[in-house]
């Protein structure tokens, strides 16, 4: 079965850029999404189709996907961005999530 | 305003059955693919199942091995998940989510907790 691998944790200082990676075999040939989840809340879509940002998502969130790696970039990270982040793709018609990355804003 | 409200969670014994519902409002339900995603306590997200807008295409996670059935009622704007032969490892918050590979899962419900325990 298809697998997506994320680092368990990423730390960033306020105002700096955070990069969260998601690796999978030929992931760049698939479409990827990213979700933000804060404690006790439902996930929120922050990136879809690799690079698109839903309405209401701040411009500091951006995405890329090439080769075997999709990346979520948060520019000018704020304290409110501290959360768990999950990548997701489709393996033919099966949904697949990465294991999640805890972003800590120190 | 798009709203998805899950219900039907609770405590069930191993081997038992349970049906979850997701009531949709604020959008044309019949025009969207729908999904179930679960999250075990303290764990990550796991895709469970998807159903197309017209119910013609249905997919499940391989790990479910035929124990779960997704369905929808467009007349009543509701999504369902019927779960059989429940196991302790099915214990999770179950979310319904709108969307597909093109839109992403753009709206989520608040989730309903299913606990499988004797």
Image: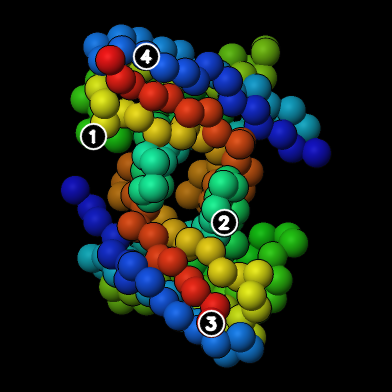
**Residue receiving disc 1:** B62
**Is A69 left or right of B111, judged from the image as shown?**
left
Q: Is residue B72 above or below residue A28?
A: above
Circle 4: is it few (<14), some (14-19), or many (20+) Cα within 10 Å? some
Q: Are marks 4 and 2 in contact (CB under 8 Å)?
A: no
Q: Real-space Cα distance between discs 2 and 1?
A: 28 Å
Callout 3: SS: loop
* In this view, B67 is above or below B4: above
Q: Vertically, is B45 above or below B96?
A: below
Q: Residues within 10 Å of mark 3 (few under 14, many from 20)?
A: few
Kind of element beneath mark 1: helix
Which chain is mark 4 on?
Answer: B
Q: Residue at x 58, y 20 (%)?
A: B7
Q: Position of residue B99 (x, y in %)?
A: 56, 42
**Residues beneath discs 4 and 2 located on the same chain:** no
Of the numbered discs in the image, which one, if any, rests on residue A106?
Answer: 3
Q: Are marks 3 and 4 in contact (CB under 8 Å)?
A: no
Question: Residue at label 2?
Answer: A38
The residue mark sitting in front, 1 or 3, is 3
Residue B110 appears in the rendering? yes
Q: Spatial distance from mark 4 to mark 2, Cα to Cα?
A: 28 Å
Front position among marks 2 and 1? 2
Q: Foreground: B81 or B74?
A: B81
**Disc 2 packing (10 Å; few <14; some 14–19; many ≥20):** some
Mark identifier at residue B12: 4
- Give the letter of the chain under mark 3: A
Q: Seen from this angle, which residue lies furthest top?
A: B16
Give the residue drawn at x 61%, y 19%.
Answer: B78
Query: Which of the two discs, 4 and 1, labels the residue nearer the N terminus?
Result: 4
- For the image, the number of numbered tags is 4
């Amino acid at each position: 079965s298809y697998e997506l691998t994320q680092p368990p944790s990423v730390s960033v200082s306020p105002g700096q850029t955070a990069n969260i990676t998601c690796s999978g075999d030929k992931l760049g040939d698939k479409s990827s999404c990213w979700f933000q989840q804060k404690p006790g809340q439902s996930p929120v879509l922050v990136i879809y189709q690799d690079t698109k940002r839903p309405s209401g998502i701040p411009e500091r969130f951006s995405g890329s996907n090439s080769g075997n790696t999709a990346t979520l970039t948060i520019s000018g990270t704020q304290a409110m961005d501290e959360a768990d982040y999950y990548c997701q793709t489709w393996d033919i018609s099966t949904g697949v999530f990465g294991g999640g990355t805890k972003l800590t804003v120190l | 305003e798009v709203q998805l409200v899950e219900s039907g969670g609770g405590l069930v014994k191993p081997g038992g059955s349970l049906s979850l519902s997701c009531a949709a409002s604020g959008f044309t339900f019949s025009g969207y693919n729908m999904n179930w995603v679960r999250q075990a306590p303290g764990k990550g997200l796991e895709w469970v199942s998807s159903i197309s807008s017209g119910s013609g295409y249905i997919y499940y996670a391989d790990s479910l091995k035929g124990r779960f059935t997704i369905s929808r009622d467009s007349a009543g704007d509701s999504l369902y998940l019927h779960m059989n032969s429940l196991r302790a490892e099915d214990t999770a918050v179950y979310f319904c989510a709108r969307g597909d590979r093109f839109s992403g899962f753009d709206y989520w419900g608040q989730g309903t907790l299913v606990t499988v325990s004797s």
